[in-house]
Image: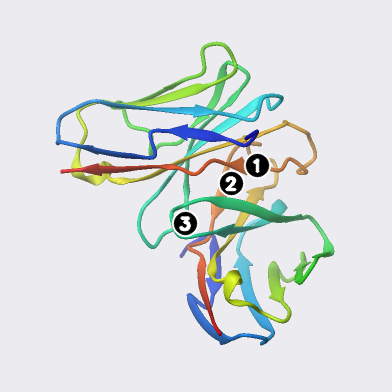
Amino acid sequence: KNEVEQSPQNLTAQEGEFITINCSYSVGISALHWLQQHPGGGIVSLFMLSSGKKKHGRLIATINIQEKHSSLHITASHPRDSAVYICAVRLVGGSQGNLIFGKGTKLSVKP
Amino acid sequence: DTGVSQDPRHKITKRGQNVTFRCDPISEHNRLYWYRQTLGQGPEFLTYFQNEAQLEKSRLLSDRFSAERPKGSFSTLEIQRTEQGDSAMYLCASSKGTSGGTDTQYFGPGTRLTVL
C-alpha cells in the first residue's frame, strides 16, 4: 500500500464545475504539498500545508491532521486547470529533502 | 528567467551509454533535489544537496547513478551504463532551506530520458 493515496485517479469535469481531489496518507507528516504538473513535465507548487486551510484564487486546500486527509478544491473550473495534481508529504522527523508523492490525479476540464 | 533550469530537456541514448544531466537552481537557494518520474507515477526522491554536501540518497540511486554539486550552485546527475529501465523524466528542484516544514521546492521542467 502506498503511503500517499490520491483519489480519483482521473477526473473529467465541465467548465464551471466545482472540483475536489482527495489525498490520504498513512504516516505522520510535518507538511503536505499540493503540486500541479502540466503536460511536458513542469511542476508548480500550489500549496504547502501543516494545518487548516489555504486559499489562492480559485484554489482551496484543506488538511485534517487527525484524519490524515487533505483535499484540493477548484471553484469555477476552467479548461486551463487541466493538469495532473499531485499530493506530496514530508514525514515527521524525516529528511528535509525527502518528499513522498502520490501518483497524481489527472484532471481534464471540458469547455 | 530566474526559475530552475535543466539541460537537456530530452535525451535519447542507447543502452550501455553514459548520460549526464545538468540542473541550475534558483540562485539564492541552497538546497537542490533530484527526483525521477516514470509514466503514470508520481515523482520518486533520488537525492538532495545542502549547498555542496549530498545529505541523503535514496536506495533507488544505484551504483550506476552519481550526483554532484561541486560549488554549491549547479548540479549534475550522471547515469553510467544506462538500462532501458532508466527511461524516465528526471526532475530537479531547489529551495531556500527554511526549517520547520515550511520549505517550498521549485521544480525545473525536467529532462526526459529515453534508453533504446
Label 2 and label 1: CA atoms lie apart by: 10 Å
As shown in the figure, which amino acid type bears the numbered disc 2?
A: Leu
Residue drawn at the location 58% of the way across and 35% of the way down: B4
Callout 1: 10 Å neighbours few (<14), some, many (20+)?
A: many
Mark 3 secondary-structure assignment = loop
Task: Using the image, name the chain to which the residue with label 1 belongs.
Answer: B
Vertical position of residue B30 compared to residue A55: above or below: above
* Front position among marks 2 and 1: 1
Vertical position of residue B40 compared to residue A107: above or below: above
Q: Are marks 3 and 2 on the same chain?
A: no
Instruction: Name the foreground residue: B100 vs A38.
Output: A38
Vertical position of residue B55 compared to residue B33: above or below: above
Q: Are marks 2 and 1 in contact (CB under 8 Å)?
A: yes
Label 3 and label 1: CA atoms lie apart by: 15 Å
State left or right for residue A48 relative to residue B5: right
Label 3 and label 2: CA atoms lie apart by: 11 Å
State left or right for residue B58 relative to residue B93: left
* Front position among marks 3 and 2: 3
Q: Are marks 3 and 1 in contact (CB under 8 Å)?
A: no
* Residue holding disc 3: B42
Residue drawn at the location 60% of the way across and 16% of the way down: B72
As shown in the figure, which amino acid type bears the numbered disc 3?
A: Gly
Instruction: Name the foreground residue: B12 vs A5.
Output: B12
Task: Using the image, name the chain to which the residue with label 3 belongs.
Answer: B
As shown in the figure, which amino acid type bears the numbered disc 1?
A: Gln
Residue drawn at the location 69% of the way across and 85% of the way down: A18
